[in-house]
Amino acid sequence: MNANRLLISVLFATVLCSGDGIVAQDAPDTIDPDEILATARFLASDELAGRNFGSPEGRIAAVYIASRFEALGLVPAGDEESYFQSVKKGQNVIAKLPGSGDPERSGEVIVVGAHMDHLGVGENGVWNGADDNASGVAVLIAVAEALSRGPRPARTVIFATFDGEEKGLIGSRHYCEKPPVALEKTVLMINLDMVGRDFMDFFPIFLFAVGSESSPAVREVLEAKNKEGPGFRLLEFTAALLGQFWASSDHLPFWEAKVPFLFLSTGMHKEYHKPEDDTDLLKPKKMARIAGMVTEIVRTIASAEDRPMYQELDQVITKEDRAGIEAILGPAIKLGPMMGLQPDALERLGKIESRVKDDEHEWSEAEVNDLCKELRALLTRMR
Ligand SMILES: [Zn+2]
């Protein structure tokens, strides 16, 4: 980090902490940051050659994940009573923790998913994909471990690591075509994709929690568990809006099937889809906090009397979208000149900010397009 970047990050921290004074709490003792880091380190090692879809190293990653599931005593839920679900030349790895409730509730499932593939080897070396998405798989395994040790929830929990996400959500689409438990019985899907860093390296307290608009019950539990636990500043963008300025991920096919979903991510950074996305940049304590929160969310929803129901969104830009945009735009506008933003760009962002602050504003399609274009440009620039 050069002096300029350091100064900017100090200023960002000042801007952010002036608000709600959040103090992060450590994860419960049952979740070990070192173990999470060790998992990510294995998956993102040079020997695994970037876990390209259909590669022998991708297969090694799958066998490794299956062996972790087996060690936890999870039940295979892939093809022919194995942990593997073949997907073209690759494979998803799927295991379940059977529910302890009455047949109706134990017949329902929560899916915790994370993609395990990355982009292989390129001209500049191995694309290790430590944050994208060894981090998500490592957190998923920590959640599986915590849940399998504690009291058994009433509903079944499925742990799925998807292959071929980077090639167009191949594994998660296949899962939704051939789910081990019907999607009508799937009450929630939690997607963990890039959960090991700080957004733009500047925002340690931000956590993207996209999709909570898909079910009021899920939103309520998410917000309560975050408050009790890690105290992140949640950016609850709607999936519809986020998808217009940032790439999508494995929650998409579940959303299309009207399954309530939650996409958790610590967000973009400058090593995104570059060979430099390495393990030494991961933040294991933060990953453990996320794993602790996800464990609590799953436990609560899996044990609740009623299942969360999917809700269709009828708004273009919700109040949560506006809060998320403000959280990103505020500091960007304040520090724009230092980031080299030209006056005309600052003026455009200022115009968007005032629209966002006006809760009466009726968004036209052109304005939404404009907003997404500016956010995309800003994210690229901040990276
Ligand atoms: Zn990813």
Image (cartoon, rainbow, N blue to C red):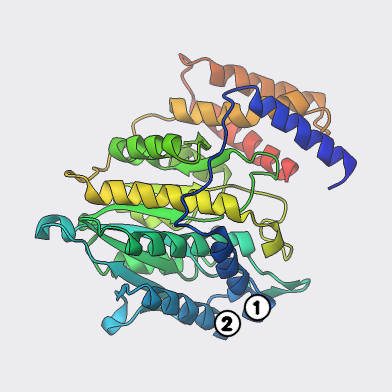
- Residue found farthest to the right: 3
Residue 27 picture location, percent across and down: 50, 49
Locate residue 33 relative to residue 335 in the image: left or right. Answer: left
Asked if the beta carbon under badge 2 is closer than 8 A to the nearest atom of ligand 1, the reply is no
Locate residue 16 relative to residue 181 in the image: left or right. Answer: right
Give residue 178's quadrant in the image.
bottom left
Of 111 and 148, nearer the camera is 148
Tell me whether circle 2 and circle 1 mark residues in contact (CB < 8 Å).
yes
Residue 297 seen in render: yes
Q: Is residue 364 above or below residue 237?
A: above
Q: Which three-letter amino acid code belongs to the residue tagged 1?
A: Ala
Disc 1 marks which residue? Answer: 49
Residue at image position (50%, 45%) is: 243
Disc 2 marks which residue? Answer: 57
Residue at image position (83%, 48%) is: 1
Q: Is residue 313 above or below residue 104?
A: above
Q: Quadrant of ligand 1?
A: bottom right
Give residue 227's quadrant in the image.
top left
Disc number placed over residue 11 in the picture, else none: none
User: Circle 2: is it few (<14), some (14-19), or many (20+) Cα within 10 Å?
Assistant: some
Residue 358 picture location, percent across and down: 52, 14
Residue at image position (32%, 41%) is: 218
Locate residue 322 relative to residue 82 in the image: left or right. Answer: right
Give residue 349's quadrant in the image.
top right
- Distance of mark 2 from mark 1, alpha carbons? 6 Å
Label 1 SS? helix
Considering only order in the chain, which callout, 1 or 2, is on the residue closer to the N terminus?
1
Residue 327 picture location, percent across and down: 60, 29
Locate residue 275 relative to residue 236 in the image: left or right. Answer: right
Q: Is residue 82 above or below residue 358?
A: below
Label 2 SS? helix
Q: Which three-letter amino acid code belongs to the residue tagged 2?
A: Glu
